[in-house]
Image (cartoon, rainbow, N blue to C red):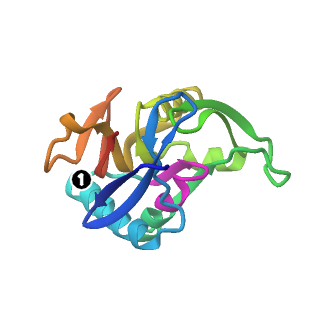
């Protein structure tokens, strides 16, 4: 029998199945892909939060797959371009560059970016966007990638921040991790 966690995100209720992650930890399975109501509401909230905090970014960076739709929605509202690191090198990618990452939900991943897309990130204020901030593994790897490629990630925006239930703080939608401010809409409580 599958257990579920009811989650409220910006007033929207969702039923999330409790599932084992690749690391063995049970997590509430959050997948925003295709949930346009949630994506649009979250993107608007994050855009306004970033504006209120006076975060100035030129371009958005995300990873495939679950970060892509929220990045696209924020890009649409902010009228900024975005770049997506892909999980496979495609034949249309010119001189793809690869980087490794590891997250609690995906395990180990390899990402690719074409050289022309990488150049669009150079000398820009980059906002990294993802669906959930869990352990920080993805962000740590993106910061390492940015340093190797001489890029500047100035902030991170996510739909959810994963925390233990007892650590949830009301009316707090930003925290600092590895010197980067992480802006988020709501919490994903660990079961």
Looking at the image, residue 165 lies above or below residue 170 = above
Q: Quadrant location of residue 189?
A: top left
Looking at the image, residue 190 lies above or below residue 62 = above
User: Which of 145 and 174 lies nearest the eye of the viewer?
Assistant: 174
User: Which of 60 and 151 lies nearest the eye of the viewer?
Assistant: 60
Q: Position of residue 69 (x, y in %)?
A: 52, 61
Q: Residue at x 47, y 28 (%)?
A: 140
Residue marked by disc 1: 54
Left or right: residue 26 compared with residue 177: right
Q: Residue furthest right?
A: 91
Looking at the image, can residue 65 be seen? Answer: yes
The magenta stretch is: 58-71
Q: Residue furthest front?
A: 1
- Callout 1: helix, strand or loop? loop
Left or right: residue 69 compared with residue 27: right
Q: Position of residue 5 (x, y in %)?
A: 35, 51
> Is 68 a magenta residue?
yes
Q: Quadrant location of residue 135?
A: top left
Number of residues whose C-alpha sits closer than 10 Å to that of mark 1, classed few (under 14), some (14–19) or many (20 or more): few
User: Which of 69 and 118 lies nearest the eye of the viewer?
Assistant: 69
Quadrant for the C terminus, please: top left
Q: Position of residue 79 (x, y in %)?
A: 44, 68
Q: Residue at x 42, y 66 (%)?
A: 39
Q: Position of residue 78 (x, y in %)?
A: 40, 66
Q: Residue furthest bottom?
A: 37
Looking at the image, can residue 127 be seen? Answer: no
Looking at the image, residue 106 lies above or below residue 172 = above
Looking at the image, residue 117 lies above or below residue 107 = below
């Amino acid at each position: 029998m599958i257990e579920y966690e009811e989650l409220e995100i910006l007033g929207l209720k969702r039923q999330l199945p409790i599932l084992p992650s690749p690391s063995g930890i049970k997590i509430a399975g959050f997948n925003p892909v295709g949930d346009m109501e949630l994506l649009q509401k979250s993107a608007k909230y994050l855009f306004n939060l970033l504006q209120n905090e006076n975060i100035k970014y030129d371009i958005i960076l995300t990873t495939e797959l679950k970060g892509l739709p929220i990045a696209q929605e924020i890009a649409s509202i902010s009228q900024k371009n975005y770049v997506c690191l892909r999980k496979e090198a495609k034949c249309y990618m010119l001189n793809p560059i690869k980087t490794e990452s590891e997250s609690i939900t995906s395990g180990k991943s390899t990402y690719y970016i074409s050289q022309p897309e990488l150049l669009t990130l150079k000398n820009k204020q980059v906002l990294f966007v993802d669906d959930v901030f869990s352990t920080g593994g993805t962000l740590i790897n993106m910061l390492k990638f940015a340093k190797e490629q001489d890029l500047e990630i100035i902030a991170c925006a996510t739909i959810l921040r994963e925390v233990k239930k007892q650590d949830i703080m009301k009316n707090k939608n930003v925290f600092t991790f590895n010197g980067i401010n992480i802006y988020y809409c709501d919490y994903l409580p660990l079961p």
